[in-house]
Image (cartoon, rainbow, N blue to C red):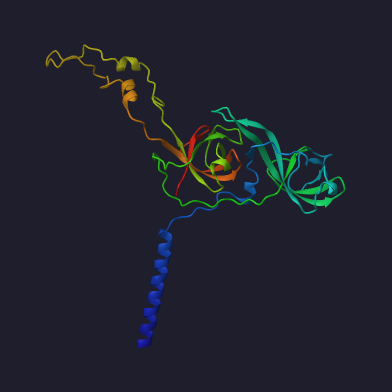
Amino acid sequence: MRESIRVAIVLTVLVFLAFFKTASAQQGPVKSEPVAREAGIYCTGYISEVSPRTDLQVVGAEKENERDGYSQGDVVYLNKGRESGVQSGAVYYIIRPLGAVKHPFTKKKVGYFVRELGLLRVTEVHEKISVAEITVSCDPIEFGDVLKPYEVQTAPGGQDLRPLPRYSEGSSGLTGRIIMSPIAKEYLSVNQLAFIDLGNRQGVRAGDHFTIYRRITRGEGVAKIAGDDIVQERSGGYGSERFRGGDFSSSAPRAPRSDVRRSRPALPRKVMGELVVLKVENTACIALITRSVSEVNIGDFVERMNY
């Protein structure tokens, strides 16, 4: 009998400990998943400080008599072989330089926008030409697309999920601006990419998290009401003849809006969302928007989180 009681007590304690451990795990900080799949990291594009080399290119394809665009699984030909140091098994990024980028607000040159089209692996090497298979394709690959040596890239991990502070004062961290989108959109949302005018020279690293915010300037966003100049004007003739309370306007505000705007202190900034840096070059980086409460615009400010 005593043995049965002892076993029952032990089982009860074990069940309690298991429940306590589960409850503690549930109450702990919630971690989000990695922000992007590995294949997605190879398709973001980047802004390079200098124009990429174009000496190693795709110059032909096994099925070039059937179509002019190629994708995963297709065999293509490269314009260099053994005499140029190309080796069987080598992996390359497939890229397409598209031209110089200027900062939309400072008008200074930022670098060169480069699209990333996928990956290929060299399967056979001849003296002056090589054969390769496309292993990852983001967009159709065409003749003249350029190759860049492969470097391993990993998606940054997620951040602790916590409520988004809508009107935070900020953390006095590194600040910059969103300058363009690789998909030629001005209004961006969650899971879309944005370029920031910060890079290696400012100490930015892949995995850095930034707050997206918008400053409220004096007079910005104030509603324009039809006939507002009439309402704002303190016209007389509304005083009570019975109580002799004096002349006043029954609908005018206490003070004109323009006077209030001129005298008020700076308003809190509006937090629009958050983003995480995926790739960094010297003068710019590309980041993924992970959270937003409204559309994110080209020109919105970003501030690196210090926690």
From the top left corner, tell me how far across and down residue 195 is, in percent. Answer: 57, 38
Most extreme residue toward the right, as rendered? 127
Which residue is at 85% across, 45% downward?
129
Residue 166 image point, x, y percent: 40, 40
Query: Residue at point 39% right, 39% down?
Result: 169
Q: Is 280 or 160 nearer to us in this picture?
A: 280
Q: Is 176 placed above or below 74 here?
A: above
**Outermost residue to the left:** 243
Identify the image quadrant of residue 63: top right
Question: At which x and y percent is residue 177?
Answer: 51, 35
Q: Can residue 292 be seen in this snapshot? A: no
x and y, in percent, of residue 211 in the image: 47, 41
Most extreme residue toward the top is 237
Residue reaching furthest front? 201
Residue 270, quarter of picture: top left
The quarter in which the N terminus is drawn is bottom left
**In the rendered image, is residue 128 in sight?**
yes
Front-lying residue, 263 or 226: 263
Q: Residue at x 34, y 21 (%)?
A: 258
Q: How many marks?
A: 0
